[in-house]
Image (spheres, rainbow, N blue to C red):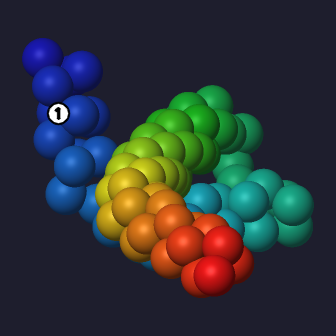
Amino acid sequence: MAAKKKEAEAGKMEYGEARRELEEILRALEEGEVEVDRLAGQVERAAELIRICREKLHAQEVKIRKVAAELEKEIAPEEEEEEEEEEGSDGK
């Protein structure tokens, strides 16, 4: 059940929100503001936030690659037509 809660949280949490929380945890760790009793929990939370950020970045990368591939498909026929037109005009 905890895994499902984490998955739901990852889906709802924005990248910027996760990054900000991670930065806060890292700052507190670096400055020694985290009590020993909470240290493991903070490190676990930081690891979860890193996972969330990586997943969000990967999802965006996949979307960007898909859009770029679609653009390439649209551009390729236009370039072929231009090349054919150039070849036809060179033969005159």
Q: Report the residue that reaches farthest toward the front.
A: 92
Q: Secondary structure at mark 1?
A: helix
41 left or right, relative to 17: right
Q: Residue at x 69, y 78 (%)?
A: 90
28 left or right, relative to 42: right
Task: Work out which quarter of the rendered image holds the C terminus and state it.
Answer: bottom right
Residue 78 rendering spot, x and y as whole percentages: 41, 71
Q: Is residue 23 above or below residue 50?
A: below
Q: Residue at x 12, y 17 (%)?
A: 1
Q: How many residues crowd mark 1 within 10 Å: few (<14), some (14–19), many (20+)?
A: few
45 and 77: which one is in front? Answer: 77
Residue 15 seen anywhere in this rendered image of the structure: no
Q: Residue at x 76, y 68 (%)?
A: 27
Q: Amino acid at mark 1?
A: Lys
41 and 70: which one is in front? Answer: 70
In the figure, residue 64 lies in which quadrant?
A: bottom left
Q: How many marks?
A: 1
Residue 20 rendering spot, x and y as whole percentages: 55, 73
38 and 59: which one is in front? Answer: 59
- Residue at which label 1 appears: 5
Q: Residue at x 87, y 61 (%)?
A: 30
Residue 76 rendering spot, x and y as whole percentages: 46, 60
15 and 48: which one is in front? Answer: 15
Q: Is residue 59 above or below residue 92?
A: above
In the figure, residue 38 lies in which quadrant?
A: top right
2 left or right, relative to 46: left
Residue 23 seen anywhere in this rendered image of the structure: yes
